[in-house]
Amino acid sequence: MGPAQLSVASTLPVSEEKVPVPQGLRPASFWLLVIVFLAVYIGSVFSPPLLDDADSTHAEAAREMLVTGDYVTLHVNGVRYLEKAPLPYWLVAGSYQLFGINEFSTRLPMALSILLLGVLALVWGRRAFGDRAGIYAALFVYTTAGVFLFTRILIPDVLLSFLIATALYFFLTGLETKNSWRWYAGYACMALGVLTKGLIALAFPGGAAFIYLAVTGEWKRWREFRLPSGLTLFVLIAAPWHILAGLRNTGGQGGHGFFWFYFVNEHFLRFLGKRYPRDYNKLPWALYWSLHLVWLFPWSLYFPAAIRAVLDARKKEHKAAFSDRTRLLCWILAGLVLVFFAISTNQEYYTLPAYLPLLLLVADGMARSEDVDCRLEVRKGALRFSAGLLAIIGVTAGIVLVTLLWQSRHLPFEPDIGNVLAKHNLDTDTLSTSHMLDLSYESFAALRLPAILAAVTLFIAPPLSFLLRFHKRHYVATWTMALGMSAFLVAAHIALGRFGPYLSSRDLAQQIAVRAHPRDRVMIYGDQAFGSSLLFYLQRPIELVQGRTTSMWFGSTFPDAPNIYLTDADLKQAWHGPSRVFLFVPPHLKMKVDSLLPDRFVIAETSGKYVYSNQR
């Protein structure tokens, strides 16, 4: 290709024709999407055991909902748990009713939410950009690191992401087709989102729609938005639970009830960083933004293609197509979510609602860049650069894994990985991914199988994808990288299973269960979150010594709170009483408990977590 042709290629807009899938590969692509989802997400609903902290706490709330029949006020350990919206717990309780109380039924609703998020990506991407972009968007949802990582615990953010995106999809298609049912479906999705995670499900789609209408001037069509009837439907769906919860939960700390705690403390004060109790952190600004390259890996490295698609679309004379509207709305939604949580307090997974719009943009950019690359016979470009960078990262990471495996080859296998992990302060470290920092050199002796699988995948998939792009086999190159990422995520799930004894207390619960009688007392020293999986697996009340903290604080201030909160003096009195006591002790509090209770019997131990008893 000569200089003149290169000049033309660099300035020619990307075609707005919808980019198809290569001939003969369309049916296979849909089947492969199903296989990828089943391998990565359905294969991981059975294990590991439910984890301590949020995972088992939320599962226990759903279990107690089913047992008590109270579908308005959440309870954990018999204590009012008023900080969460109910829809995820309704879904899990329904799953328990159908499939029994176990790990599978706990994780099934969120796995189905991931499935629906991918289906939405497929439908929206195909409608806006064509078959190839739609398939890519769904594929990226199922193989992105952050979606996998932040659905390993029972949190509602993937369901929230689906409902927010679905509301905006109906909003955008309502503008295009003028079908009134689409507007009502959008209002219903926002209401369900509010029942999933509160007011942000109204703020994000409402804010994104407002900005979009202001930028495009389509606010002039406001009569089509079905505002009075749509908002009536929204209120009819969202309001009843809030009203009932407010009426049934009054008389807490300082006379406050549900409305103050849920809306003021959990929404506005959390945003301002003044929520009480302060059991959360905020990522540093630079880390907050840069980590999204990790959460959206590997497709974040193709982000330049999304930017190129926008620049090319600006050269069009007419910009009213559904594809243009989708691009603009996706940029607005992603930007709104990311900026909001950059200002607010945050956890790493809070920005999950930004993933789908960003992945749609990347899928569009990649599909169009692949099409132009093949039609114009361009030998070099952003696609190859991104693929080459991925290959370098993959091979480098593979070399690191092989080096660690080689250096640890003589170390004995440690079935309890918690014994060889670094320790950190559980009282102050509240970020959800902080356990990644616990990996030590010795821990690789317990991670040989997943590390080998990950290393093989990293050595093969990224370099092969680069070679295929170099030879203009772009569609196969994208699928090669995606299938490699699927294998990598399967390896990550195997590794997570090795962390089971460290992150969960199920094994300790089983040791207590075979020894405890109904009249025996079970206690946790410190915050309930340190051993919350005991609640789920023992399915009995647990007393908390010095545990009137974090999520258990506000519910404890109600007059009907169960008498489960003990002081050190109460513990010592019970320890020398006639009843048998089983005391769970987290690693960082062991020295304190040992000095408090010199006469004790060790019943069980895993990963530095102990169960003591006052009797043999």
Image (cartoon, helix red, strand yellow):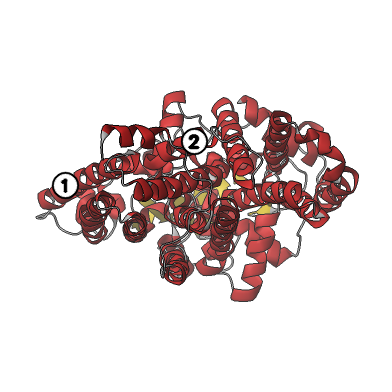
- Find residue 327 and report its horizontal and vertical position in percent: 58, 40
Image quarter for residue 552?
A: top right
Q: Label 2 crowding class (10 Å Cα cut-off): few <14, some 14-19, many 20+? A: some
Q: What residue is drawn where x is 54% and y is 51%?
A: 129
Tell which of 191 and 12 is nearer to you. 12
Which residue type does callout 2 highlight? Asp
Q: Is residue 603 left or right of residue 312?
A: left
For image coordinates 40% across by 35% down, the residue present is 425
Q: Which quadrant of the figure contains the C terminus?
A: bottom left
Identify the element where label 2 is drawn.
helix
Q: Please give the count of numbered marks on the rendered protein.
A: 2
The residue positioned 51% from the left and 31% from the top of the image is 281
Mark with earlier residue (1, 2):
2
- Disc 1 from disc 2: Cα separation: 39 Å
**Residue 577, visible in the rendered structure:** no
Describe the element under mark 1 as helix, strand or loop: helix
Task: Tell me if mark 1 has few (under 14), some (14-19) or many (20+) residues whose alpha carbon lies within 10 angstroms of its own.
Answer: some
Q: Amino acid at mark 1?
A: Ile
Residue 126 position in % (x across, y down): 56, 56
Q: Nearer the viewer, residue 482 or 489?
A: 482
- Residue 399 badge: 1
**Viewer-nearest of discs 1 and 2:** 2
Can I make out residue 544 in this image?
yes
Answer with left or right where residue 571 lies relative to residue 369: right
Q: Which mark is residue 312?
A: 2
